[in-house]
Amino acid sequence: MKSRFSKIVILVFLVANLGMAEYIKKDNAVYYKDEIWQSDEKKVNDADFKTFVELNKIYGKDSKNVFYEDRKLENADVKTFQVIGEVNGKDKKYIYNYDEKMEINPKDFKLYKNKDKLLYFRNNGKLYIGGSFLEVEYVQDLDSFEAIDEGYSKDKYNIYYAGTPIYDVDKSTFQIIMPDYYAKDKNNVYRGYDKIKDANPDTIKILNQVYLKDDKNVFLNFGQKIENVDVAAFQAIEGNVAYGKDKNNVYYLGEKIKGADAKSFEVILEPSDLIQMYSKDKNSVFIGGLKIKEADLKTFERLSGTTYYSKDKNNLYYQEVKIDKIDNKNLKILYSDGIDLVKNGNKIFSEGKKLNIKNPKTFEIISNEYNSVPSLIYGKDDKNVYAITRFDEVYSSKIIKNADVNSFEIMKNNMYTKDKNNIYFTRNDVVKLEGADKDSFVIQENDNDFSYDKNNVYFMGKKINGINSNEFRIIDLNNKNESFYFLTDNKNLYKLITIFDEDSGKIVKTKLVTIENSKVDTKSFEVINKNFDTYYRDKNSVYYYDADFGKELKKLEAADSNSFISLEADFGKDDRNVYYNGNKLEGVNSDGLEILDENTIIFKNKSNVYFLKAKNEEKKYKFIPLNFDSSSFKPVHKRSGYFKDKNGIYYFDYSNLEKLDTEKTEDIQNKLFFKIEGVDVPTFRELQFGYSKDRNRVYCKNKEVKGADAESFVIFYADEGVVVKDKNRTYENNCEW
C-alpha cells in the first residue's frame, strides 16, 4: 500500500514543481534561483543587467553571452542561440541538452517538434530523443521518419512507441485513439508498444489513462482484465483516474474495493488537492482501495495541507491506519512541505510514526530560509535540538548532542548546522566537526560532503588527517571498482578511499593516500571527462588511472594534453594517437575514431576497422585490422548482433570469442563475422533472440529460416512466454542457442 502511494506522490511532486526556477534581476545584477535543488539565489557572474533576458527556466542571455542556470554556456553563439525545448537549445554550430552540447552536422540535422515540445532530433545519421542525447536504436529508415506525438512515431517500415517498434502492426489501419497512450489497428489495441490481449479494436472505448473497455471486457492500461465486472455498466469515476465502478462494485486500479457502495461512491475532492486518493460512500471512508475502518463518515476530513493525514471527531489517521485519539485543541501541522509533521496533543508524528521528542509542549520547527523542500528538517524544544530525516529507512528524530538551543542555526547547505560552539553535519548520522573554525569554515560547492576551514578538511563531518586546506580541491570521484576521490592541496595529489556500511550508509573507514608522482602539477590537475573518469591531465601531461589492476596513476608519455579527450570503454585519443586502458595503440591513427562495440571492443578510424583483444594478463593488447569498408561499417543498432557496411550485413557470433585464436589474423574475420548472403540491405532489421529479417526472408543468425513469411514474421511476449511466428506457423524460440 505504502509503496504504491509513494510512487504517485513522487510523480505528482515532480510534475507540480516543474518550472520552480527563475532568473531574478535586482540590485543591478542577475541571479538564478531553483527552489527545488538550490539552497539560495546564485549570482549569474558576467551577466549584463541591462541586456539580460530570460529565455526559459534554465537558459538566459545578454548581448554577449548565453547562460545555463547561473553559469556561462561556453562557446554558445549568442546571436543564433534559441530555445527549442524545455531543456534544449540550439545555435548555428551546436545543439544543447542542459549544458551538454553536440556539434551539428548542417547537412543532416532535423528537429521533430510538437508545438514547443522537442520530441526527437536527427544528427549525423542518428536519431535522438528530445530532452536527452539518448540515441534511438531501432528506427529502420530515418529519411521517412515522422514523430506523431510524444509517444508514437513511424517510418515507411514500422510504427514505433518511444523508439521501439510495435511488432505485427497493420500500418494501413493504425490510428492513435488517445495521444501518447493508446492506439489500434484492424487487429489489435495497443498501450504503447504492448498489445492489449483480447481487446476488440472495433468496439474499444478509452475511459481514461487507466481504464478502457470493449464489448466483452474491461481492461487496465497494460492489458490486465478486470474479472467478473459488468462491462456495459462500467465507468471511470471523475476526480481520480485510479477509480472505476459498475452497478455493483467499485474498483481501485482494477481491484475490487471490499464493501464499497457503487451508487453512493465518490472521490473526496478539496480545492488544493494534488492527490485525490480519498473517497467515500454512504457508509465508509477509503484511501486507495482500503477502508479506513474506524472513520466517522460525518466528521471525516482530510488534514488540509498534508498528503496522508486525516481525522474525524474521534481519531487521527495516517493512510488507512488509526495512529492516535484526536486532540482537536492541540492539533497542529508543524511542517508540510515534502515531509509532514503533525502535533496531536503531546505527541508528534512523522509519516505516521511517533517521534522521540523529550518535551513536545515546547517543540517547534527551526525555520530554514535556504531550502524549500528539504529531506532534512530541524526542530527544538526547551533543552534539545533535533535532526529529523530518514534515519534507518524511516523518518525519525535524533538529538544533536550538546547543541545550544538558543544559538543553533541552519547553514546555507541544509546538511550543515552550527551553534555558538560547534558545526554539525547530518546525513545518515549527526556528526560534530571536531576543531572546526567557524569564521573560516567553507562548504565545498561542487560536492557538499566536503568542507574545510583554515586548518582542516572534512568529509561527511570527519576530519581528514594529512591534507592541507590551503588550495584544497576535489578532482574527481571514481566509482568504477572502488569508491575514492582524487584530492589536491597546494603540495600534493591524494587519493581518499572511503568505505561505507551498506545498511546504514555511515562511514566505516577513510584512508588518505599520497600519490607518489612528483611530476603532477596539482594546480592544473583535472579529470578530462567526468562521464568516463579514467583519464586525467595537468598543463603538461595526460594520466591514466587503472582501477582494475595496479590502481596507480600512470603518465602517458606520448599523449598531447591539449588535444586529448576521454571516450567510452576506456578509450582515449589526442590529435595523433589512440589509447586503450592507458596503452598507446601503435600504428592506429585517431582520425575518425569511433567505438562501435564497447563489450567486445570493435572500433574504427578513417582507414580501418579493428578488433581488439587482450593478449595477456600484463595488459598488453593486440589489435587486428578487419577487412571491412571503414567509412560505412557500423552496427545495425547501437547494441547489436549484426554489423553492416556498403557490401552487406554480417552476423557477429559472440559465442566464438572464447575459442578464438587471435594469433591468426584470418581467423578473426572468418570465425566471428558471418555474411548473410542475398540479404536486402535497405529493408534489413534486427529482431530479438538472434532473429532478423528483410522484406523477402527471415534469418536465424546468418542463416535463412526456410519457408518463413517475412512480412508476417513477428516475435512478441504473451502469457505463455516468448512467441515466434508468422501467418503459417509457430516456431520454437531456439535461434540464440
Image (cartoon, helix red, strand yellow):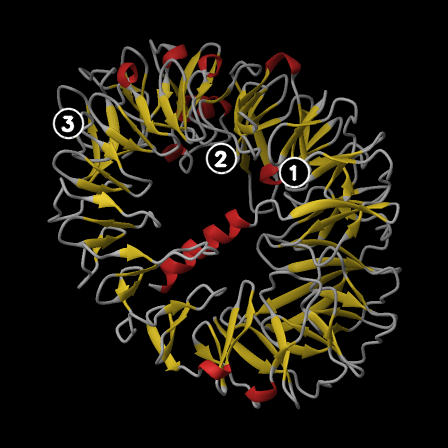
The residue at 56%/25% (across/down) is: 610
Q: Say which residue label 2 marks.
A: 600
User: Where is residue 198 shown, x and y percent of the image?
Assistant: 16, 34
Spatial separation of the CA atoms under disc 2 and disc 3: 33 Å
Residue type, numbered disc 3? Thr
User: Where is residue 266 shown, x and y percent of the image?
Assistant: 28, 55
**712 lies above or below 689:** above
The residue at 53%/24% (across/down) is: 113
Q: Say which residue label 3 marks.
A: 730
The quarter of the picture where the N terminus appears is bottom left
Spatial separation of the CA atoms under disc 1 and disc 3: 48 Å
Q: Pointers 1 and 3 in contact (CB under 8 A)?
A: no
Q: Is residue 37 left or right of residue 696?
A: right
Between disc 2 and disc 3, whose residue precedes? 2
Between disc 2 and disc 1, whose residue precedes? 1
- In the structure shown, which secondary structural element does the residue marked by tag 1 occupy? loop
User: From where the camera sits, is residue 735 visible?
Assistant: no
- In the structure shown, which secondary structural element does the residue marked by tag 2 occupy? loop
Question: How many residues crowd around disc 1 within 10 Å: few (fewer than 14), some, or many (20 or more)?
Answer: some
User: From where the camera sits, is residue 685 visible?
Assistant: yes
Residue type, numbered disc 2? Thr
Q: Is residue 459 left or right of residue 319?
A: right
Q: Say which residue label 1 marks.
A: 98
Viewer-side residue, 350 vs 687: 350
- For marks 1 and 3, give the one nearer the viewer: 1
